[in-house]
């Protein structure tokens, strides 16, 4: 069955379109699996961090941007272990779980996928070239190739405006959001993404999304 991934800058409407697509498929008798994933925040790794905070208070910083977190992750050993564990859990999610669901005939919709995580890693760990690590190469070789990779894009100013309206608790600082936007633009020229400009109404964007998926025999 199909593997559909939606990528894009924050507040481009990924969650809205995934909810629309899920409902669309359910109305046609399908039961899609919806998967949100982000390197370092997958279920297994998040559970490990909670466990460590309880057993060794102060061993790792709380979630979100903070000086404490940045200070801890400036340590090379901590940073290396953090990234390795994040990659190992992504191997579990992408290389094992997704393959299992596909074998069971399920359609999988991913909110973010490999390249969103690569952008996160490049932003948060500029000292590391994670894409050269053997664990990253193993992850990319084991992860199934999506049947449809969709990139939702909106202007940077619109992303900031929507973030302020939603009052997001862990929003990127403006300079980080700007770098993230540039990285998506650069990757969109090299990755096999179908780019949808998502500045219209949610219904209009969804119509373009479903048209693309139907035209390519994916749904």
Image (cartoon, grey):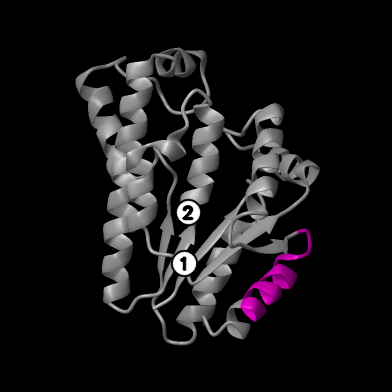
Task: Give the residue at x 35% y 25%.
Answer: 80
Q: Spatial distance from mark 1 to mark 2, Cα to Cα?
A: 9 Å
Residue 121: assigned label: none
Left or right of 174 on screen, residue 117: left
Under circle 1, the secondary element is: loop
Magenta span of residues: 199-212
Q: Do the residues labelled 1 and 2 touch (CB within 8 Å)?
A: yes
Task: Give the residue at x 43% y 37%.
Answer: 132
- Residue density around tag 2, few if under 14, some if 14–19, many if 20 or more, within 10 Å: many
Left or right of 27 on screen, residue 196: right
The residue that disc 2 covers is 113
- Of all residues, the one furthest to the left in this rendering is 55
Residue 41 quadrant: top left
Task: Name the N-terminal-most of marks 1 and 2.
Answer: 2
Under circle 2, the secondary element is: loop
How many marks on residues? 2
Task: Give the residue at x 56% y 31%.
Answer: 123
Task: Give the residue at x 54% y 79%.
Answer: 24
Residue 146: assigned label: 1
Magenta residues: mostly which secondary structure? helix
The percent position of residue 92, horizontal first and vertical second, equals 27, 51
Establish if 79 lies above or below 171. Answer: above
């Amino acid at each position: 069955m199909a593997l559909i991934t939606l990528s894009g800058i924050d507040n481009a409407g990924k969650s809205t379109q995934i909810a629309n697509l899920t409902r669309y498929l359910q109305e046609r008798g399908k039961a899609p699996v919806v998967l949100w994933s982000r390197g370092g925040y997958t279920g297994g790794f998040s559970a490990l961090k909670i466990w460590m905070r309880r057993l060794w208070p102060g061993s790792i910083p709380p979630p979100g941007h903070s000086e404490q977190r940045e200070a801890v992750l400036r340590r090379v050993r901590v940073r290396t272990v953090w990234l390795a564990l994040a990659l190992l859990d992504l191997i579990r999610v992408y290389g094992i779980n997704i393959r299992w669901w596909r074998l069971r005939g399920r359609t999988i919709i991913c909110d973010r996928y490999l390249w969103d995580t690569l952008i996160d890693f490049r932003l948060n760990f500029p000292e590391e070239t994670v894409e050269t690590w053997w664990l990253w190469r193993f992850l990319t070789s084991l992860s199934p190739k999506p049947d449809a990779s969709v990139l939702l894009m909106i202007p940077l100013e619109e992303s900031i405006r929507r973030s302020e309206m939603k009052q997001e608790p862990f929003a990127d600082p403006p300079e980080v959001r700007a770098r993230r936007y540039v990285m998506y633009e650069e990757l969109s020229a090299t990755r096999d993404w179908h780019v949808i400009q998502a500045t219209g109404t949610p219904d209009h964007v969804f119509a373009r999304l479903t048209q693309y998926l139907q035209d390519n025999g994916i749904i």
